[in-house]
Image: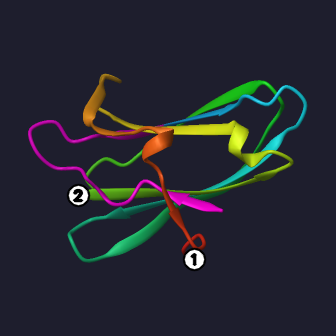
Amino acid sequence: MALSTGIITNTGSTPATNIVINIDNTNLSFSSNVVYHIYVWNNFVSKSLVYANSININANTSQILSFNITGNTSYEVQFLVTGQVPTDTLITVFGTDASGNVIHHEKVLNSELTSIAQLNP
């Protein structure tokens, strides 16, 4: 099953310069594979895929990834988690400012991710 943050607006007095993705595989026996796509909007119309990759997360390990999104008015992160127990892989997404501070209105917790039919191309 694919998941999405939905479109996150990145404007205001402190727009995010980076996205931090935390991926935690809580399963004690099985690894998981996470495919992620990061889309940005330079204005409110044009959607562009800027990052796409696949990462293996070993059992009982985590990965923290960071991506630059400076100058974009909105962004979305989509995920596809596969493996023996994909529901044991927890993902959170945070927008951060240039100093690395979390922008609280730009956070998406695992429970807030939305199921989507498939990753967009």
> What segment is highlighted magenta in the picture?
1-20
Q: Which residue is the extreme one toward the right?
A: 29
In terms of secondary structure, where does tag 1 sit?
Answer: loop
Report the amino acid beneath label 2.
Thr
Q: Earlier in the sequence, mark 1 or mark 2?
A: 2
Q: Is residue 46 left or right of residue 52?
A: left
* Category of crowding for the residue at label 2, using alpha-carbon neighbours closer than 10 angstroms: few (below 14), some (14–19), many (at least 20): some
Label annotation for residue 73: 2
Residue 104 position (above or below residue 87): above
Report the amino acid beneath label 1.
Pro
Residue 29 position (above or below residue 11): above
Residue 7 position (above or below residue 15): below
Q: Is residue 47 magenta?
A: no
**Position of residue 73 measured from the top left corner of the image (x, y, whole percent):** 23, 57
Quadrant of the rendered structure where residue 29 is? Answer: top right
Residue shown at the point (73%, 28%) measured from the top left? 26
**Position of residue 115 measured from the top left corner of the image (x, y, whole percent):** 53, 62
Q: Is residue 69 left or right of residue 50?
A: left
| Residue at numbered disc 1 | 121
In terms of secondary structure, where does tag 2 sit?
Answer: loop
